[in-house]
Amino acid sequence: MKISKLIGAAAAVTLAFSLSACAQSNSPVIAPVTMDAGDLQGETVELVVGQVLNINTGDLAVDSYSGEVADTSVAEFTKGYEKDGATFNPGVKALADGATTVVLSNSDGGIEDITFTVEVGK
């Protein structure tokens, strides 16, 4: 009886270590870069593949911005939105090495388009 309990305990420990190893990922977590929309005009934002530029819209609605990316193989625009009480800022995700121009427009009117460059490296 004691041997079976010892074998069971050893199996449980082995399983716990195996599951904790599965939970760890070999790919590093890439923190987003956060900038205010008003600070982006004429700037160059450097990102790495997989990184996101999180655009803080300040007092303007997050869903009032749209974005046009000149080279969609390098980066993509993600529209901001609100869901279940949470607010998600608009952003630009780096997809591949290169550089591209991004133009942000605001549907609320009276706001000048914001043009900036995204440079993506590895």
Image (cartoon, rainbow, N blue to C red):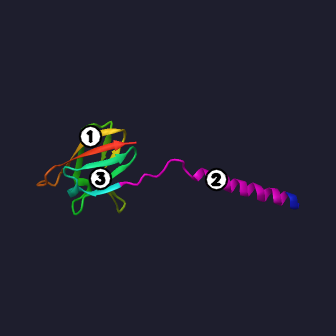
Badge 2 marks a residue whose secondary structure is helix
Residue 57 position in % (x across, y down): 24, 58
Q: Which residue occupies 77% across, 57% down?
A: 10
Q: Earlier in the sequence, mark 2 or mark 1?
A: 2
* Residue identified by numbered label 3: 90
Q: Which amino acid, mark 1?
A: Thr
Q: Which residue occupies 54% across, 50% down?
A: 25
Q: Which residue occupies 29% across, 52% down?
A: 90
Residue 6 colored in magenta in the image? yes
Q: Specify the quadrant that holds the C terminus.
A: top left
Q: Quadrant of residue 102?
A: top left
> Going by the image, does 38 lie left or right of 81?
left
**Crowding at mark 3 (Cα within 10 Å: few <14, some 14-19, many 20+):** many
Q: Gap in Å between the C-alphas at discs 3 and 1?
A: 17 Å
Q: Quadrant of residue 103?
A: top left
Q: Earlier in the sequence, mark 3 or mark 2?
A: 2
Residue 3 position in % (x across, y down): 87, 58
Badge 3 marks a residue whose secondary structure is loop
Residue 68 position in % (x across, y down): 23, 42
**Crowding at mark 1 (Cα within 10 Å: few <14, some 14-19, many 20+):** some
Q: Which numbered dot is residue 19?
A: 2
* Residue identified by numbered label 1: 100
- Where does the magenta region start and end? 4-32
**Crowding at mark 2 (Cα within 10 Å: few <14, some 14-19, many 20+):** few
Q: Which amino acid, mark 3?
A: Pro
Q: Earlier in the sequence, mark 3 or mark 1?
A: 3
Q: Gap in Å between the C-alphas at discs 3 and 2?
A: 36 Å
Q: Which amino acid, mark 2?
A: Leu
Q: Specify the quadrant that holds the N terminus.
A: bottom right
